[in-house]
Image: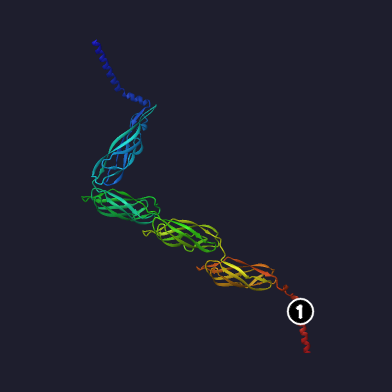
Amino acid sequence: MEATMKAGGRALVAGFVLLVLVGTTGTPALVAAQESSGVTSGEPDLEVYLPDNELAPGTEETVTFQIANDGEVDYGSAVEQVTTARGVSLEIEDSGPFEVKTGETPIGPIRDGQVGEVTQRIAVPENIKPGTYDVDVRVRYDYTNRVTSSGTQRLSASERQTVTIRIPDEPQFAVSDVETNVAPGASGDATFEIENIGTRTARNTRATITGGGGVVVDGGTAEEVLGNLGPGESTTVTVRAAIDESVGDDGSKPLSVAFTYDDKNGVEQEGDTLTASLAPARELKFSIEEVQSSLRVGETQTVSGTVTNEGPRTADNAVVTLSDPGPTITPIETSVAVGSLDPGESASFAFDVEVTSSAVAGPRQFEFGVNYWDQENTKLQSDTLPARVGVSQGTPEFDVDPINATFSAGSGGEFELTVTNTRDYAVSDVSAKIYMDSPLSSSDDEAFIERLEPGESQTIRFQLSADNGATAKTYPVKMDFQYDEPDGDTIISDTYQVPVQVTEQSGGGGLPIFPIAAVLVVLLAGGGYLYYRRQD
């Protein structure tokens, strides 16, 4: 019995040893079997870094964390499925002496071999001592650790990792409060503050300032000597900035500021190069309203309106301009000064405009503008301000009314007319001339008026005759005027047409010529006969 029990025990031990050996030596075979069946196993491996880990006391900065994925594959070919970290997020859990301004932030998927980035806002105390500080971050993500023919296995992971933040024991600089009233297309002063936010004094500090994005500083580069700046000390820097006209006023433009200084041993050091933001001032906006027009074809009349400064600053010595619409419309003057305009202030303007007689009545597009000076004594020009202006059909310069315009055939006399100036300005040196065709004729076809005030009338006279054989009816007499306008221009008017009435000869038309001649012959003969008888 005892022998039997001993034999059974040895068999059990031998079986256990055999099982261990089989399990140990059978792993490669099991892996090979799983690979051949299409099974894949693995997982992501995430590591958090903070490449730019230097922060200055008393600042609030945005730092960028990087998360690198070096995935691991146990076996199988579906590598990307098992090594990709999905839904990655990062949160600072233990910030040490720092204050974190942001919470857990999503990053998205990170594939094997890729690096994801996420930013966090961190505030640094002013009284923090130089040195290194550990910050703990929490990384969360989902992943697939196993892929088989029947499906996948999804898991979630949460890892706590530590990064280091360094507070250097040296001068550090910050640029803030960049201000300017310079608008695109202008130049002027830009001011900003430079502060030593580090823990050491910067001696013989120099700043090199350059612009970008259409901003030019001091013609290219500004060199500013700042002197000694202790921890917490600041100074104001003013540079001359020119902003290109193509630069919009809806975004900031960069200013690059590089620093050099001497350390406590007198050795020259280079500080970080910082980028400041220069926001161009908004361009002044203007509006044109209440445009009224008395323009007529063939006349010089007025276009008037109101210009308003819509802000945001004062426009000094503003001048409203009018582009030449040409070719049949010509402004007598192309600019009208309206003075300085505060934001919201308006001023009226008026332009005298000549419309030629060849123009056609109808609406026209006029383009106004405003030239002005800003507070930096730079001349600027507004955008084009279009306005619709009407041109009416022209009216005659004169009203011509006949007084004596009836003549009998074979007679003549004074042809009298009343001429009235219909313009709203005086005309001078008015020369009138008439033109006619047979059976009308004139021995005096010109008349002169020295001056006609607006609405004034004067009578002019010509000599006019109608031939004996003229048929009794109405005939046209044409006439025109040459005159001078107040600006000295000499104008020739349109042609006027005046009706002249010719009537039949008075007394039935007179005695026939042949009977009258016969009577004269008889009278002469009788007279001669009596004369000779007396002589005998």
Residue 145, how many percent across, how many down?
35, 30
Disc 1 target residue: 519
Q: Is residue 185 left or right of residue 52?
A: right
Which residue sits furthest left?
265
Instruction: Tell me which corner region of the image, top left, top right, bottom left or bottom right, holds residue 434.
Output: bottom right
Amino acid on which the number 1 mark rests in the picture: Val
- How packed mark 1 is, by other alpha carbons closer than 10 Å (few <14, some 14-19, many 20 or more), is few
Residue 42, how many percent across, how many down?
34, 30
Instruction: Tell me which corner region of the image, top left, top right, bottom left or bottom right, holds residue 286.
Output: bottom left
Q: How is the image coloured?
A: rainbow
Q: Is residue 106 left or right of residue 234?
A: right
Quarter containing the C terminus: bottom right
Vertical side of 60 occupied by 440: above or below: below
Vertical side of 133 occupied by 203: above or below: below
Q: Which is nearer the eye, 177 or 531?
A: 177
Vertical side of 8 occupied by 70: above or below: below
For the image shown, how many numbered marks are present on the structure? 1
Which residue sits furthest top?
1
Q: Which is nearer the eye, 367 or 19?
A: 367
Residue 374, how many percent across, how many down?
38, 58
Residue 230, how many percent across, how many down?
24, 51
Give the residue at x 31% y 51%: 176
Instruction: Tell me which corner region of the image, top left, top right, bottom left or bottom right, holds residue 534.
Output: bottom right
- Disc 1 element: helix
Residue 261 visible in the current orientation: yes
Quarter containing the N terminus: top left
Vertical side of 2 occupied by 122: above or below: below
Residue 438 visible in the current orientation: no
Q: Which is nearer the eye, 377 or 284?
A: 284
